[in-house]
Image (cartoon, rainbow, N blue to C red):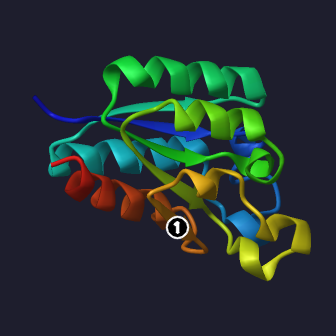
Amino acid sequence: MAPRIQIINGPNLNLLGKRQPEIYGAETLDDVARDCEALAAELGLELSFYQSNHEGGIIDCIHAARETCAGIVINPGAYTHTSVAILDALNAFDGKVIECHISNVHKRESFRHHSYVSLRADGVIAGFGTQGYQLALRRMAVLTA
């Protein structure tokens, strides 16, 4: 049975390709999902893709993943820097977690340099644009093999 990976995207990522393309690029979240689905098939992974602008929705998705997923790739957006609740939910997840950011958060405003999610993540990918999701899936294939 193929390992199932949950990809979770936080607030404003629904505007990917439209919001600040000089930082986040021109690809849409649908483009990212399509590319991830294709790569997941090559890697022998099953994939679920989720986006929410609401902290509770993200937490509910993490809780649901406890029953069905071997790993989570999460781009929590701005919740990276503010959400102890998402950290707590991830701490209740027994599988692997990779934190993924499209931009290099360490080259941006100082408040973006701290991540609550990193306290739980098995790895962090930042600054590789939307290709970071594919890098995360490649690593997840190794971690969940």
Residue at the limit of the structure toward the left, as seen here: 1
Q: Which residue shows up at 83% across the image and 47% down it?
A: 82
Give the number of marks: 1
Residue 112 image position (x, y, % from top left): 82, 66
Residue occupying the point 69% across, 50% down: 16
Viewer-side residue, 45 vs 89: 89
Instruction: Give the residue drawn at x 52%, y 65%.
Output: 124
State the image quarter where residue 27 is shown.
bottom right
Residue 11 placement, left or right of 41: right
Q: Residue furthest bottom?
A: 107
Q: In this view of the protein, which residue sits in the foreground, 101 or 66? A: 66
Viewed as shown, does residue 38 lie left or right of 97?
A: left
Task: Tell me where residue 76 appears, x and y as whole percent.
Answer: 67, 45
Residue at (65, 41) in percent of width and height: 87
- List x then y, in percent, for residue 111: 89, 66
Residue 50: image x %, image y %? 54, 30
Give the crowd class for mark 1: few <14, some 14-19, many >=20 residues within 10 Å.
Answer: many
**Quick check: 85 above or below 64?**
below
Q: Which quarter of the figure is the N terminus placed in? A: top left
| 78 on left or right of 4 | right
Amino acid, disc 1: Ile
Q: Is residue 119 above or below residue 70?
A: below
Residue highlighted by disc 1: 125
> In terms of secondary structure, where does tag 1 sit?
strand
Q: Is residue 17 above or below residue 67?
A: below
